[in-house]
Amino acid sequence: SATPACDGRHVYVTTAVNGSVWVTAIDFSGRIVWQSAAGPFECKWGYASSPTIYKSLVIVAADHASAPLNAGQGSSHLAALHRQTGEIVWRIRRPSGDSFGTPIVATVAGRDQLLIAGKGSVRSYDPATGDPLWTCRWSALRSANSVAFDDEHVFASAKHPQGELICIRADGEGDVTASHVVWRDKSSASEVPSPLVHDGLVYSLGDDGILSCLDSTTGKVMWKRRLGGNMSSSPLIAGGHLYCSN
């Protein structure tokens, strides 16, 4: 289910094989340049997270709930590999639990942040080192999509065990649950399609085909529309149009 990433020189592909996440770099002639195991991964639903490029790194996530990486620790992890060699530059522990979203690197609140939602929390890291920046707790036991962002905020959505669409101010440090949550909405969340932010509006496409539009500042629902059919792909904006495919 993962989408390859490309830096203009190599294509990077992630796959789960024999209990590990493997990252492969391929050149434009189809030759494998390097192939490295980023870390362990086992999940009955398979692997879905896509690789993310940041400067000299390709970053991959592996949130799951299987055997521990080290004694007494869970095996969920984020790993950054050098794009030219496949060498692991850093790898950090993640909360144990199955999640499938792609890590997003964005400049938010004036700094580069590596953003990912998962079981029990939405988190931000320094993409160069993997050091934690902030954590915001939420009710989700898993996340199946990727976060959205604007200049100052991060938006995350999940449906299991209950729906929650959350807006977090991204300039905090440590646990920001009590101080930086701008709003939460229980009625407009999506499970698999990722939320989308554009021109002060948040678009959330439900798996049931209901599209919600919210004010990004207040969380007020501006409108809802049933599009028809079930949805798994994320909405896209291009040329002044919002595209949703079922």
Image (spheres, rainbow, N blue to C red):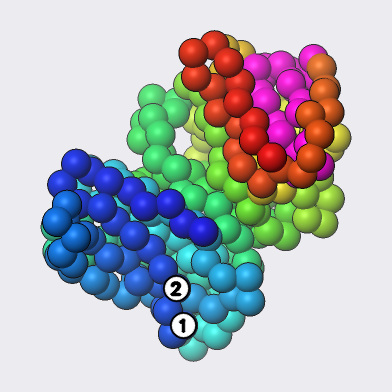
Hey, which quadrant is residue 199 in on the image?
A: top right
The residue type indicated by label 2 comes to: Ala
* Residue sitting at x 46%, y 49%: 103
The answer to which image quadrant residue 30 occupies is: bottom left
Q: Position of residue 11 (x, y in %)?
A: 26, 53
- The residue lying toward the viewer, choosing from 148 and 152, is 148
Task: Name which residue lies at 55% across and 28% down.
Answer: 236
Q: Name the residue under label 2.
A: 16
Query: Which residue does the image show at 57% across and 58% down from the upper left?
Result: 100
If the image is split into quadrants, where does the C terminus sit? top right
- 243 vs 151, left or right, is right
**With 115 as the anchor, is 25 left or right in this view?**
left
* Residue tagged 1: 19
Q: Are marks 2 and 1 in contact (CB under 8 Å)?
A: yes
- Give how far across and how far down residue 28 sits, in percent: 17, 52
| Magenta highlight range | 201-222
Is label 1 in a helix, a strand or a loop? loop
